[in-house]
Structure formats: structure tokens, C-alpha cells
Image (cartoon, rainbow, N blue to C red):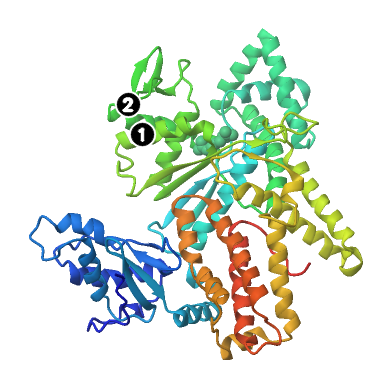
Amino acid sequence: FPVKWAHSTSTMADTTKDDTGSLKEQLAKVFEVSLKVTVPDEPEVLPLIAPCSRKEAGDYQCNNAMSLWSKIKGKGTDYKGPQPVGQAIMRNLPASDMIESCSIAGPGFINVKLSTQWIAKSIQKMLIDGIDTWAPKLPVKTAVVDFSSPNIAKEMHVGHLRSTIIGDTLARMLEYSKVDVLRRNHVGDWGTQFGMLIEFLFEKFPDGKVNDQDIGELEVFYKASKQRFDGDAAFKERAQQAVVSLQGGEEKYRKAWAQICEISRKGFEKVYQRLGVHLEEKGESFYNPFIPGTLDLLRQKGLIEESEGAQVIFIEGKKIPLIVVKRDGGFNYASTDLAALWYRLNEEKAEWIIYVTDVGQREHFEMFFTAAKRAGWLPTDENKHPKTSHVGFGLVLGDDGKRFRTRSTEVVKLVDLLDEAKTRCKAALVERGKAAEWTPEELEQTAEAVGYGAVKYADLKNNRLTNYTFNFDQMLNDKGNTAVYLLYAHARICSIIRKSGKDIEELKREGQIKLEKDEERKLGLHLLQFPEVVEEACTNLLPNVLCEYLYDLSEKFTSFYSECQVVGSAEETSRLLLCEATAVVMRKCFHLLGITPVYKI
Ligand code: ARG
């Protein structure tokens, strides 16, 4: 039978005084006290807290009893099974104002019902102190997020758009969690294709004057030079010689290279500006001087071997080794990544290095991560730091189920894509009569926020590993799980508060949140779960977890709003505060997802 428990008579000190950390963490602290008392001989045991699997039984549950029982049963314990262990854990809980009641279920699961008053107080505290106090604590101080990383002279394609959007969100979540993030654009600005490009540049512009072509044209330039390279043996030879001259640091070649890079950079920058993404470029060329030293270190550890004229690292379980010096003596993508890893670990002291690319590159990352482990640069235990993570993502598909392409060019022009989203949003706003109601700037800004937000959200809401279909009609729908719907939901909440005519700052100080109705409590509890959701999204590098939370939040708000009258009710103050708290958390979600909120619709 379930045993009811209310406010323990234990004499232990109230540990809940330390009210930092997520709800789950705070609950864990309370259970930790009990575990220390219940099984003093098992100091290693950590509290296992999870949301309750049966919502009617409680809000959270403690799952320690079963595994604890199997640990202690052979050791002459007085307990007779997992349930008595659970009961003892429950009995030994210190007094805590966060818990209203506990009950035992099955083989010792402890269901916890949180105190409604405590939930209300915690939300109010956040309203006063700000949502930054809800930032989760992560076990790292410095992280590198290597994302976007397009290749010079080639168009940025929709895969780079995914990398940019996902990487930016991960960086934002880590930054919110007080991690120092180095946002790195590992652009492909080195390698043999530059010989070909430089030689072609010399041919086309013998006087060395290059017009400021846009990136689209540079792609045409790339294609034309490739054609030249493939079709003319003498040109090919000159191109190969140009690589040598460039890598030897010859002035004329360096200048041409820098020129090509600069033109590309301007094109990339247009996309970043539109997306509101900030990155610091440290391209492949930056790490080039570090490659020989890095390889020497690996050689000293005996990792590098000769194979068919190349220098390679064999990786257990892989048929093909990691090539680090090509047969012609040149370095490649892998040698650069090894040098970059060395630099990030030793010069930048990064404790977590996160790489955002399509899943197609998984093998490459797995291989050089393994090499780094073998070299002793990274611990073999994945839970220890420093650590590396490859954040892979799937393809973007068109309506035909094939790899997404636009009609005009083979690769999708990102700027056009963003422009179209904005144009469509603007048209929808005009249709709703907003052109007459708003200033042209307001119209423009809203169309941008909603349009770009829709593109980002459509990408982020999916588990990143799955392919998803790019569809404007779907992502711009104002119903369903879209940014449009969510942004409108937020604007609606803001308008409720505005229309009440109340000063929300004053209410925060003088009013009080009460969660009397079931829908109010559910919304309140969900708000309080924000920190643990961000923590999960960060730890597992899954932005969709945050999207799910946000969508859920707006649904919980809708239930609350349809059940509970806000303006003009007896509970107006409390409910306005709940509206405000919802808006604050929604805005933080938008911020973390790189979406600009809108305040009116
Ligand atoms: N430039 C590469 C590409 O377009 C992505 C680079 C990813 N970062 C890295 N350190 N390998 O596929």
C-alpha cells in the first residue's frame, strides 16, 4: 500500500536553503541527505531523480531503492527488500519546504508531490531576480563550438545553413550556462583547390585587379577554373606549382589567395548578418603552421606509420587508416583537424570541443578523436573532460523527397531562401491589414523576425539526426508547431498584460502568485522545469529538446488561459504574473534558439 508521508520529523538541517540549480538538482540535494543517513556505508550512491512516470502519482520520483537493494542485499543488511529501502529513504528525508508529500509505489519508487506554494514562490523569485538565475550549471568552463565552416570560393549550401543554425543555438545555450564559448568558423580556406583558383585568377585578371564579385559569381569562378584544371594539362601543372608557391609563402600568391578569401567572406557575412549569428573565423590555414609539430608529437607516441607511401594512423576496427600526410607530402583535412585539436586543447584550454557537421563526416571525427585518445590527449572515459563531440545532422529534403535544391542553381542560395521567407511573411502581414496599422519599419522587422525565425525553428525542432523536408507553407503556418505560432502566442500574452493597464513591475514587488487551479499549477511546474530542460539540451547537444519544451509551454499556457479568466478576475494579479513569467521564459527560449521575439501581432 502506498504510504503517505508529510513533512518529516527528522532533525536534519533544512538543506533546501541552497536554492540554486534546477528543480531536479534541488530535489536531488534533499534526497542526498536522506541517502547518507539511510545507507551510510554507500557514500558513492547518487540520487536518481526523474519526472514521475505516472503524473497522477506525483511530479517527480526517486528511483534509488531497487539498485540500492541489489547493492546491499548480500552485505548483511536489515532491510528485507527494495520497498523497505524506499520507505527508509522516504522516512529519512529532511524537512523541506519544496515537498508537499511523498508516497511509495511498487518496489520502492518514491513519488514526490511538490509544494504548490513553493512552485509559486520560486517563479516569483525568478521574476524579481531575472531568468539568468535559472541558468543551469555545467561541468565545463571553456568550450569551442566549431560550426558553419563553409568552404571558400564555394557557395554556402543548405548543409552549412543547418550547421550555422544548430551551432549558434548550442553556443547560445552554453553561453547562457556561463560557459566561455569560442565560436569558431573553421572555413575551408586552404588546400589544393587554391592553386587552381589562383592560376585562374591570374589568367582572368592579369593586371591583378579583381572586381568585388558577389559570392554567387565566385562559385561560377570556381566551376570555370575546375573545368580549366580538368581540361588542360599545362594549366593543371601551373596550378599544382601555384600551390607550392602559396604554401611557400610567396607574396604574389598569398595576395591572390587573400583576395579570393575576402570575396567569399563577404558573401558568408551576408548570411550571418541576416541570421544574427556571430562567429570568429579561424580557418584551416590558421592551423597549417601547427601541423608539423602536431604530427611530431603523434610520431613520438608511435602512432604514425608508413602505408603505401602515405603516413597514416591505424584505428582499431576501421579498415582504412586515417591519412595524415598524403603521398605527395601534403597535409589534408585530417592533419588540419589534428593540429586544430592540439591548439584548442593546449592553447585555448578548451574543455569541450563541439563540431557541427552533417552526419556524413562522422567517420572522420570518430577516427581522429580515437587517435587523440590513443595519444593521451583526451581521456578514454567519455564522462571526463576535456572531451570532444561530433554533432551530426541529417539532410534537408525538398518536397520530392530528394536532397533540397532550388530551381535556379544546383546548390541552394541561402540568402534567397531567407529573403523568400521574409517576403512571404510580409505578404501575410499585409493581408491582415498590418500595413495600415504599423510603421513600415515595424512591418519590416516583424516580417524578418517571423520569417527567419520560421526557417530556424523548422530546422531545430527536429531531432538533428533525422532528415527533414524544407517547406515554406508548413514552416510559415500560424497553426501547429511552428515559430509563427509560437511568436504569435508570445505576442498575445504581451497584449493581455498591456491591455490590463497594470504596471507589471509593481505587481512583481507587491503581488503574489497563487496556483489554485490545476491548469495554473501545471503551467507553473512547467515554467520551473526550464533549467533542467536547458541542461538536458546542452548535455546531449539536442536543440529539439528545447523546442519541445517551448511548444509544450505555449500549449500549457493555452489550457490555462481557456480555463482561467485573467483580466477582471479576483485572481488578476496572480494570473498576470503567471502570464509575465510565461512570456519571460518564452523569450529566453526564443533567445536561445536565435529567434527574435515579437511583441504585437
Ligand atoms: N569545411 C567543412 C565542410 O564544409 C566543415 C568543417 C568542419 N569542422 C572541422 N573542424 N572539420 O564540410
Residue at 73% across / 47% down in the picture? 474
SS state under label 2: loop
Helix, strand, or loop for circle 1? Answer: helix
Question: Quadrant of the image for the C terminus?
Answer: bottom right
Can residue 386 be seen in this snapshot? Answer: yes
Q: Residue at x 65, y 32 (%)?
A: 255
Q: Residue at x 72, y 32 (%)?
A: 400
Q: Amino acid at mark 1?
A: Thr
Please name whichever residue, 46 or 319, is drawn nearer the observer in this view of the structure.
Answer: 46
**Which residue is the site of mark 1?**
370
Q: Residue furthest top?
A: 233
Where is residue 162? Give x, y as percent: 62, 43
Instruction: Mark 2 and mark 1 in contact? Answer it, CB < 8 Å.
Output: yes
Q: Which residue is mark 2?
A: 316
Look at 38% across and 46% down and name the residue there. Answer: 387
> Tag 2: Cα neighbours inside 10 Å, few (<14), some, or many (≥20)?
few
Q: Can you tell which quarter of the image residue 484 is in?
A: bottom right
Q: Earlier in the sequence, mark 2 or mark 1?
A: 2
